[in-house]
Image (spheres, rainbow, N blue to C red):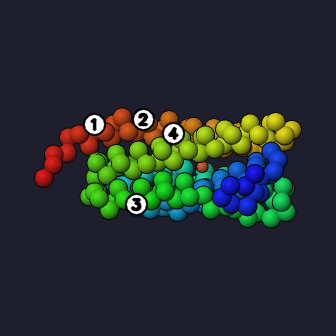
Amino acid sequence: MGFITPNDYDDLRSLYTGQLQYLLSTENQIVKGLESMIDHAQDTQLKQAFQSHKQETEVQVQRLDKLISELTGDSDDKKDPIATALISSGVNIVRESSEGPVRDAGLLATAQKIEHYEIASYGAAIAWATTLGLTDHAALLEKTLEEEKHADHLLTTIAQRENVEAAAVSAQ
Ligand SMILES: [Fe+2]
């Protein structure tokens, strides 16, 4: 039953394909979002974490391109409004703060929200690929999921230090 939009998903395979297309949009938006976050972060370790995750994300885009092409014959994405909203919340933090530890703490929180969204999305995609018998898809997506979890853990470690530095900044 289609409620609001035409019903593209009439089986699990089409739902899975749609999930990969949303993820491709998400990852492409994250590459651009990370470029901005690298520019606006002050902390050297944070900048490096964003830079290395941007490089990982570019590989994740290639993986999704490959999987979607196998399913549909092209690598079209579907614009993901949730990724857009999460990334624009980071833009707002930049607008509403000056460069320094407080802004960095806000950018860390935004980046971790995005990571958790990706971890949930890849988790569903892997479960569907496995159920559909697409074990090669599940294995490739698992690599990306591990990178997302690793990035999230690294951001947690940086936030533990950065939050203390942010707390030491006194309001003007
Ligand atoms: Fe990612």
Nearest to N terminus: mark 4 or mark 1: 4
Q: Amino acid at mark 1?
A: Val
Q: Residues within 10 Å of mark 3 (few under 14, many from 20)?
A: some
- Residue on which the image places disc 1: 164
- Residue drawn at x 70%, y 50% as measured from the top left: 19
Residue that label 3 marks: 91
Q: Mark 4 or 2 closer to N-term?
A: 4
Residue flagged by tag 3: what amino acid is it?
Val
| N-terminal-most mark, 2 or 1 | 2
Instruction: Answer above or below: position of 143 versus 39.
Output: above
> Cα distance, mark 3 to mark 1?
23 Å
In the rendered image, residue 120, in percent from the top left (x then y), is placed at 61, 40
Please tell me in which quadrant of the rendered image residue 132 appears.
top right
Q: Residue at x 52, y 63 (%)?
A: 32
State yes or no: Cβ of the residue under disc 3 lies below 8 Å from any atom of ligand 1.
Answer: no
Q: Secondary structure at mark 2?
A: helix
Q: Mark 3 or mark 2, which is nearer to you?
A: 3
The Cα–Cα distance between marks 4 and 2, rounded to whole angstroms, is 9 Å
> Within 10 Å of the Cα at label 4, are there few (<14), some (14-19), or many (20+) other Cα atoms?
many
Q: Amino acid at mark 4?
A: Asp
Q: Earlier in the sequence, mark 3 or mark 2?
A: 3
Lateral position of residue 29 relative to residue 38, left or right = right
